Image: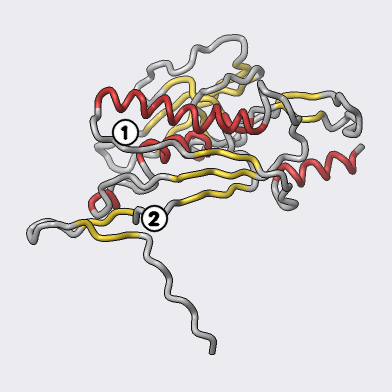
């Protein structure tokens, strides 16, 4: 049998006293990179695409703004308004998590369906409108999750006992959407990725730096590769639309 190379450890121990729990950190010569086949759901999916009815071979195809499907959060669990509700919100829904105990009350969040999509807003994952409120997804959209991980790190509270320094991504790379309109500086696919992930992380880190000294976290670089992943959701929708036309 061929000898396989020994896997290189990602973590290294931090010197600690005998009384304290042994802690670790990511090796200095190690970085983490994420590849995604499509722009993450939520704010990062709001970019300009070619309309399915247009001829994609023309120099200036008819375009539209991609619809995220993720539900915008209108009010938090305390009932405080997060986003001003106006004529751009066509309908509202209520999401509630079941209480875990008799003492614990359920979390209720009001979300809305947008006719005109707002940029930079918090959203929950998409779900059908006819699902009972306690069965709807309470998960953050993928764009918002990436922002949270970019600020607080990939590990949760339990892991922070052993890895105190946040482990963050160095880069996020996404496959090209075949429907995306190239060269659109305002609402292009890469611009949406920068706006929804990197710039929001930068903004949050600047706020933290003013209050929390020593929070040494850098935002990830973002990129869209030139190749199209044939099995991605956007590629499947592109092929389906081409067959229908």
Q: Secondary structure at mark 2?
A: loop
Residue 167 at x, y = what percent?
Answer: 36, 47
- Residue 10 shows in the view: yes
The residue singled out by tag 2 in the image is 29
Residue 204 at x, y = what percent?
Answer: 39, 27
Residue 107 at x, y = what percent?
Answer: 38, 32
Residue at point 86% right, 26% down?
61
The reply to whether discs 2 and 1 touch (Cβ–Cβ < 8 Å) is no
Residue 169 at x, y = what percent?
Answer: 45, 45
The residue singled out by tag 1 in the image is 105
> Quadrant of the rendered structure where residue 99 is?
top left
Residue furthest out toward the bottom = 1
In this view of the protein, which residue sits in the foreground, 16 or 106?
16
Q: Secondary structure at mark 1?
A: loop
* Depicted 27 relative to depicted 221: above or below: below
Please tell me the numbered disc located at residue 237: none
């Amino acid at each position: 049998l061929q000898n396989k190379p020994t896997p290189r450890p990602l973590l290294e121990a931090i010197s600690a006293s005998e009384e304290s729990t042994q802690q670790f950190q990511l090796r200095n010569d190690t970085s983490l990179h994420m590849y995604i086949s499509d722009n993450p759901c939520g704010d990062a999916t709001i970019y300009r695409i070619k309309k399915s009815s247009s001829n994609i071979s023309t120099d200036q195809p008819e375009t539209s703004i991609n619809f995220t499907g993720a539900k915008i959060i209108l009010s938090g669990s305390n009932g405080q308004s997060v986003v001003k509700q106006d004529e751009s919100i066509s309908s509202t829904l209520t999401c509630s998590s079941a209480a875990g105990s008799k003492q614990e009350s359920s979390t209720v969040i009001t979300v809305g369906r947008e006719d005109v999509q707002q940029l930079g807003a918090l959203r929950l994952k998409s779900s059908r409108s006819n699902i009972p409120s306690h069965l709807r997804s309470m998960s953050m959209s993928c764009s918002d999750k990436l922002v949270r991980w970019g600020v607080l790190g990939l590990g949760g509270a339990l892991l922070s006992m052993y890895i105190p320094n946040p482990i963050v991504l160095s880069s996020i790379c996404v496959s090209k959407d075949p429907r995306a309109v190239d060269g659109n500086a305002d609402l292009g696919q890469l611009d949406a990725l920068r706006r929804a992930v990197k710039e929001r992380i930068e903004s949050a880190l600047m706020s933290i730096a003013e209050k929390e000294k020593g929070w040494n976290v850098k935002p990830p670089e973002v990129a869209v590769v030139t190749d199209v992943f044939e099995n991605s959701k956007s590629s499947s929708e592109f092929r389906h639309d081409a067959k229908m036309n």
